Amino acid sequence: MTKKIEQKDMSFIDHLEELRWHLIRSIIAILIISVVVFLFKSFIFDTVIFGPKRSDFITYEGFCKLSELLGLGQRMCIEPSEFVIQSINAQDQFLSHIKVALTLGFIFAFPYILWEIWQFIKPGLYDNEKKYTRGIVFFGSLLFLTGVAFGYFILAPFSINFFASYKVSEQVVNQFSLASYVSIVSTVILAAGIMFELPMIVYMLSKIGIVSPDMMRSYRKHAFVIILMIAAIITPADVWTQVLVTIPVYFLYEISVFISARVYKPV
């Protein structure tokens, strides 16, 4: 196995300097997209962020149509709970606006960020390793964006409705602060996006011999418990919502076992 020489030997300081510029370019990309998002606050908040709060949200309509197709009538139709979103502190609206802009900036810039990371790692790989990692930026970005879509269209609506409908007493009226609402939506979306990166992470670890298919099979039950715990953390204490998280993530785990078996190289 011979290593392709693409550049002269670099010192540790040189590598840090190169990494710094990759990080700087990634941060600039996030900030540029965040500024653009910041300028379209009406659309971003009224249509995107507050979408799961409206009864005409695509997820609710989709479940209702699916229910009719399955001959279940209106059983799967979801009527979102009504609640008021209010700004508690003077700076809440401005800070929430910035948080949403940065979150969306990171999401939309993720393919570029992944490409920058890959450009830093790529020179240190052998020629055959580069061959097996073709398309890593594309598939990594696809998995992340799929997870984000899953979090936004599935997890966020169920999480919001659970908290909106949960009451300890009829004397208590649910009124969410803008900051808490934005926190729920952004946390669920980003967590789902990161979890969907599992096959890509396993692929990389298997290539360098850290993770093996036998190990993943032997710890299958442990992995299932961990997935349940993660689902409980990022979703409300609602069994149905936790099942919606657990099933696709465990499916990704099984796909990861298959991927590991195909690419695993013992050290």
Image (cartoon, rainbow, N blue to C red):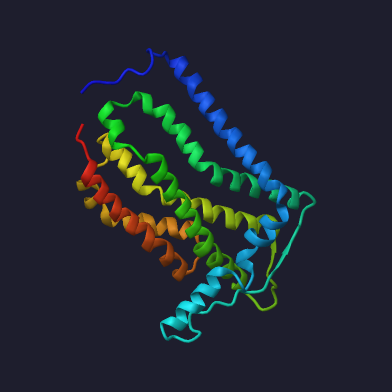
Q: How many marks?
A: 0
Name the residue at 51% across, 42% down: 110
Occupied quadrant, residue 176: bottom right
Name the residue at 57% across, 28% down: 24
**Horizontal placement of 157 versus 140: left or right?**
right
**Relative depth, front residue between 63 and 80:** 63
Q: Position of residue 56 (x, y in %)?
A: 61, 73
Q: Quadrant of the N terminus?
A: top left
Please indicate, yes or no, whether residue 208 appears anywhere in the rendered image: yes
**Horizontal placement of 99 versus 226: left or right?**
right
**Relative depth, front residue between 125 and 99:** 125
Name the residue at 27% across, 40% down: 206
Q: Quadrant of the C terminus?
A: top left
Q: Position of residue 68 (x, y in %)?
A: 46, 83
Q: Relative to residue 189, is residue 82 depicted above or below? A: below
**Horizontal placement of 58 versus 96: left or right?**
left
Q: Position of residue 175 (x, y in %)?
A: 70, 67
